[in-house]
Image (cartoon, helix red, strand yellow):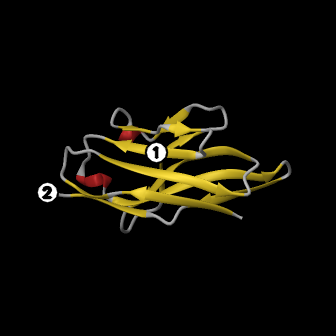
Amino acid sequence: QVHLVESGGGLVQPGGSLGLSCAASGSIFSINTMGWYRQAPGKERELVAVFTSGGTPDYADSVKGRFTIPRDNALNTVDLQMNNLKPEDTAVYYCNAIINTDPRLWGVYWGQGTQITVSS
């Protein structure tokens, strides 16, 4: 059993900053990818930022230069630091990870979702 637990989020004014954290726990053999997706009302879920299996971060074009994704491999955590937030960043943000629970078994896991609202 694997769990992803998110924290952070809330309401912020345009141009402001906010952070999210995600911690993975449970029967973890290895973490292949870990990152963040978001889903705005009436839209499909989309990639925000993710650490790929190669260990380098990948960002959506819409957040490049504004968002960063610090990761602590030892603690199985990944953060999302969001700067210069815009109203179009308003969405529910989900932590996502592809995790091996043993050398042969892997699964895709999601956090519970956290609301980010950017509004004046």
Cα separation, mark 1 vs mark 2, equals: 25 Å
Residue 91 x/y as whole percent: 36, 60
Q: Label 1 amino acid? A: Asp
Give the SS element for disc 2.
loop
**Neighbour tally class for label 1: few under 14, some 14-19, many 20 plus, Cα within 10 Å:** many
Give the SS element for disc 1.
strand
Residue 97 x/y as whole percent: 61, 52
Whether residues under marks 1 and 2 lie with C-beta atoms below 8 angstroms apart, the answer is no
Q: Quarter-wise, where is residue 66 in the image?
A: top left
Image position of 106 (left or right of 24): right
Nearest the camera: 6 or 39? Answer: 6
Residue at image location 70% in from the left, 51% down from the top: 99
Q: Label 2 amino acid? A: Ser
Query: Can you identify the residue that label 2 sits on?
Result: 120
Q: Quarter-wise, where is residue 52 in the image?
A: top right
Residue at image location 19% in from the left, 49% down from the top: 14
Image position of 42 (left or right of 49): left
**Neighbour tally class for label 2: few under 14, some 14-19, many 20 plus, Cα within 10 Å:** few
Residue 55 x/y as whole percent: 62, 32
Count of numbered tags: 2
What is the number of the mark on residue 79? 1
Name the quadrant of the N terminus. bottom right
Residue at image location 28% in from the left, 53% down from the top: 88
Q: Residue furthest right?
A: 104
Residue at image location 50% in from the left, 52% down from the top: 22
Q: Which of pointers 1 and 2 indicates the residue nearer the eye?
A: 1
Where is 2 relative to 55, above or below? Answer: below
- Please report whichever mark, 1 or 2, sits nearer to the chain's N-terminal start: 1
Q: Residue furthest left?
A: 120
Residue 32 x/y as whole percent: 68, 43
